[in-house]
């Protein structure tokens, strides 16, 4: 991508105002149109949100958007909407033992509501704090219980595919463990054994980097620095690592760019958390987080189109027909391979957080910060910003599951385009709020605010 080193945060103010205006209208529209009996909205088809029965991992994004938009705009009707929906629909997600998505669903809802209460923005009674705390404690412990021990005695939170499966996505679910730990909670095992949630978070993060992120060290023939594999497979009999794999990418030896995005954001936000913790184990964790954040950020920069938008997978076969596709802006309306704006929305926040962590007065920090601003500017404008008031989505040209052919392909086209996803919209709102709070001089936005 081409980083705009002249772009300033202030330059995005008008785009953010327009974005929040559109986002408010679409939040009301979706809340009016969506039937909760259908489950969770996942992605749009011809501009209308629909569901896909794979796992209920997006409901927290739907209601989290409502809460975040209140944070940005002060619209108390959206706060009430997000709070009521959380109270009514989110409890099963807190105790859901079958998924790796607690950091998505529950931190996005209960976590944001808790933060707003303690910031004094929501005006809620402090009596609600115990309720939010309990939800987050249980969520973190339930997520930590989804554990596979590997050959060296450490382990990881296994995906919904089963105990053999380590997903890159799940690094963001470590937020649930961290928050629960900070609230004084632990997972209680057999014989009343107390299992430390922070230790499990550290182990999962370290094993994600060990097996799912590549650093140019010759692990296989395709070991390019910053490459991310969606999934690693383990032998559950002896805990041995077996091979890379993927569920939504093109191949185990290419990079599914949304898998990359989860690490590119998960690493710097955890780095922000671990920055102030004492102890040698946390020092080592910080070094690993910094290394992975840099590798994945650089990989995104080097493997995205000029405007910072990636195609859905770096090894997608149709890219070979597109010439020097990285030397021009991304082309959502092409006949060969779809772009994935949701990967860009997730990664942009990671670039900004990592740049700020390193320091905007340092060359590396400034590079990542400016890269994040560049991607944000692209997302908050055409052809990615959804300005059609009838379209329920907010950020266009998102891709869910290309190999399964789940994404809508418009008539006369050969690849998915023009549609939105719940995770893409949520992370675009989270990205916009992150920038808005910096512009407004409000407290810095973190998932662990008020837990230390």
Image (cartoon, grey):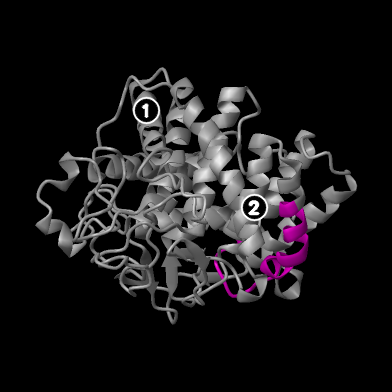
Residue plotted at (43% across, 46% down)? 345
Q: Is residue 100 magenta?
A: yes
Q: Nearer the viewer, residue 11 or 282?
A: 11
Pointer 2: residues within 10 angstroms few (<14), some, or many (20+)?
A: some
Q: Nearer the viewer, residue 285 or 168?
A: 168
Residue 351 appearing in the image: yes
Q: Secondary structure at mark 1?
A: helix
Distance from Cα at disc 1 to Cα at disc 2: 33 Å
Q: Secondary structure at mark 2?
A: helix
Residue 178 appearing in the image: no
As drawn, 196 above or below 368: below
Residue plotted at (75% across, 46% down)? 77
The stretch of residues the image draws in magenta is 81-102
Quarter of the image where the N terminus is located: top left
The earlier-in-sequence mark between 1 and 2 is 2
Residue 363 horizontal/vertical position (percent): 33, 22
Using residue 151 as the reference point, say whether residue 438 is left or right of it: right
Residue plotted at (80% across, 34% down)? 120
Q: Nearer the viewer, residue 75 or 326?
A: 75
Residue 443 horizontal/vertical position (percent): 65, 28
- Mark 1 or 2, closer to the camera: 2
Q: Is residue 324 magenta?
A: no
Picture disc at residue 28? 2
The residue carrying mark 1 is 370
Q: Quadrant of residue 376?
A: top left
As drawn, 301 above or below 318: above
Residue plotted at (70% across, 64% down)? 90
Residue 205 horizontal/vertical position (percent): 48, 54
């Amino acid at each position: 991508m081409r980083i705009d080193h002249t772009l300033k945060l202030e330059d995005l103010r008008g785009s953010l105002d327009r974005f929040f205006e559109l986002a408010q209208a679409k939040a009301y529209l979706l809340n009016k149109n969506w039937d909760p009996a259908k489950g969770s909205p996942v992605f749009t088809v011809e501009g209308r949100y629909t569901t896909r029965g794979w796992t209920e991992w997006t409901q927290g994004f739907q209601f989290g958007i409502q809460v975040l938009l209140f944070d940005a705009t002060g619209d108390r009707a959206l706060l009430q909407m997000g709070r009521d929906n959380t109270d009514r629909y989110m409890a099963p997600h807190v105790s859901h033992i079958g998924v790796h998505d607690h950091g998505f669903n529950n931190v996005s809802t209960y976590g944001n509501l808790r933060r707003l209460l303690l910031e004094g923005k929501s005006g809620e009674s402090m009596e609600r704090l115990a309720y939010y705390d309990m939800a987050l404690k249980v969520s973190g412990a339930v997520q930590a219980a989804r554990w596979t021990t590997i050959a060296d005695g450490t382990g990881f939170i296994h995906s919904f595919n089963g105990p053999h499966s380590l997903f890159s996505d799940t690094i963001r679910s470590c937020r649930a463990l961290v928050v629960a730990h900070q609230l004084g909670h632990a997972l209680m095992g057999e014989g009343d054994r107390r299992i430390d949630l922070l230790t499990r978070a550290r182990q999962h993060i370290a094993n994600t980097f060990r097996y799912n992120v590549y650093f140019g060290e010759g692990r296989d023939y395709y070991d390019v620095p910053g490459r991310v594999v969606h999934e690693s497979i383990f032998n559950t009999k002896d805990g041995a690592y077996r091979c890379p794999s993927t569920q939504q990418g093109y191949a185990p030896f290419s990079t599914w760019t949304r898998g990359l995005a989860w690490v590119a954001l998960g690493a710097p936000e955890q780095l922000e958390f671990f920055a102030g913790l004492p102890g040698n184990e946390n020092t080592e964790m910080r070094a690993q987080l910094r290394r992975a954040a840099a590798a994945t950020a650089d990989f995104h920069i080097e493997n995205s189109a000029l405007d910072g938008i990636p195609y859905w997978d770096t090894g997608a076969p149709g890219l070979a027909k597109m010439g020097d596709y990285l030397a021009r802006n991304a082309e959502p309306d092409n006949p060969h391979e779809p772009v994935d704006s949701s990967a860009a929305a997730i990664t942009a926040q990671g670039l900004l957080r990592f740049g700020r962590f390193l320091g905007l007065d340092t060359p590396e920090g400034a590079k990542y910060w400016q890269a994040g601003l560049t991607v944000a500017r692209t997302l908050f404008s055409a052809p990615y910003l959804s300005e059609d008031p009838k379209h329920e989505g907010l950020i266009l040209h998102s891709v869910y599951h290309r190999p399964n052919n789940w994404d809508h392909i418009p008539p006369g086209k050969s690849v998915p385009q023009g549609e939105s996803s719940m995770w893409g919209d949520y992370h675009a709102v989270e990205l916009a709020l992150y920038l808005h709070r910096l512009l407004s001089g409000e407290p810095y936005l973190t998932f662990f605010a008020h837990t230390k």
